[in-house]
Amino acid sequence: MKGEQQSLLFLHIAVFLFGGTALFSKLIGLPALDITVYRTGIAALALFILLTLQKKQITLATRQDYGIAILLGIVVGIHWVTYFAAMQMAGVTVGIIAFFTYPVITVFIEPLFNKSVPKVKDMLMALVVIVGIVLLIPEVSLGNQITLGIITGVFSAVFFALRNVLHKNYFSHYSGPHAMLYQTLVACLMLFLFVDIPPTQVSTSDWMLLLLVGVVFTATPHALFASSLRNLSATTAGLISCLQPLYGSVLAFLLLHERPGLLTIIGGLLVISAAVFETWSVSKGRL
């Protein structure tokens, strides 16, 4: 029980930090792929320094684990590029909401790996989350750019859900920082050759923002999120993570002066209700 409660704390901190990540798609003046490469490189370096200072093991146990690490890095790299691209094409609000179809996707992907049937409770909570996320959208435009952004956001959601389930089933025996070191490193190396703006041409202000997003909003929350999966199911983590659009909206209001409408508030309350219920269920040992 103590391990589950600690995992829930780690998860909620990670989700709050995740909520601020979307803002950097607007604050940093670089293409989505470039942001992904630089943030993952910085995150990998930060995690390597952390593990070294803690005198933790850097290598993996088996050759199979290296193969899984490469697969996870590829999946998470595609997720990050499409995530930032969705924000840049459709805007932060619509992009993040499109991405948050991933808890529902997780509900249906996870049983394929553990040969189980989705729980009725999880499916009902997923439905509530979907309704809440739809209500968060202030206005739906059928313009090509926004439509493409929504499609890209859903595509990102599929890869994020797949990454969580793969990590839970095949890589959760490693600590969060250890696991994310390899995932961020693989993602950076995989995408580096496609960088549009080289490091020497990145402005000082963008480098400061990249350092911030790489260490505080990437290395830290993803390590915490990965650690939480050691005691929580990917479905539980996905549903609780639906607090992220709310956190993102609050941060957007404070930093970008975006004002949420009534439907956004109602949708946020639905999402929070589902997340609170899921947290309570885990705390009571009902999963």
Image: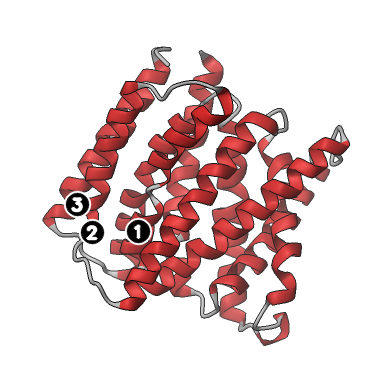
Question: Residue 150: where, in percent of width, then height?
Answer: 36, 63
In this orientation, which residue lies closer to the viewer: 216 or 125? 125
Please name the residue that numbered disc 2 is placed on: 137
Measured as percent of width and height from the top left, residue 204 is found at 62, 81
Q: CA distance from mark 1 to mark 3?
A: 19 Å
Front residue of 118/206: it is 118
| Left or right: 76, with 124 as reference point | right
Q: Left or right: 120 with respect to 138? A: right
Residue type, mark 2 in image: Ile
Q: Relative to residue 254, is residue 242 depicted above or below?
A: above
Residue 138 % position (x, y): 19, 62
Q: Amino acid at mark 1?
A: Leu
Disc on the earlier residue, 1 or 3: 3
Question: How crowded is the residue under tag 2: few (<14 C-alpha within 10 Å), some, or many (20+)?
Answer: some
| Residue in view at x 52 percent, y 26 percent | 232
Secondary structure type for disc 2: loop
Q: Is residue 74 left or right of residue 55?
A: left
- Residue contact at pointers 2 and 3, CB within 8 angstroms: yes
270 vs 88, left or right, is left
Gap between marks 1 and 2 measured at Cα: 16 Å
For label 3, the residue is 135
Q: Which residue is at 35% across, 66% downward?
A: 255
Kindly indicate whether the residue at mark 2 contacts the one at mark 1 (C-beta within 8 angstroms).
no
The circle drawn on residue 251 is 1
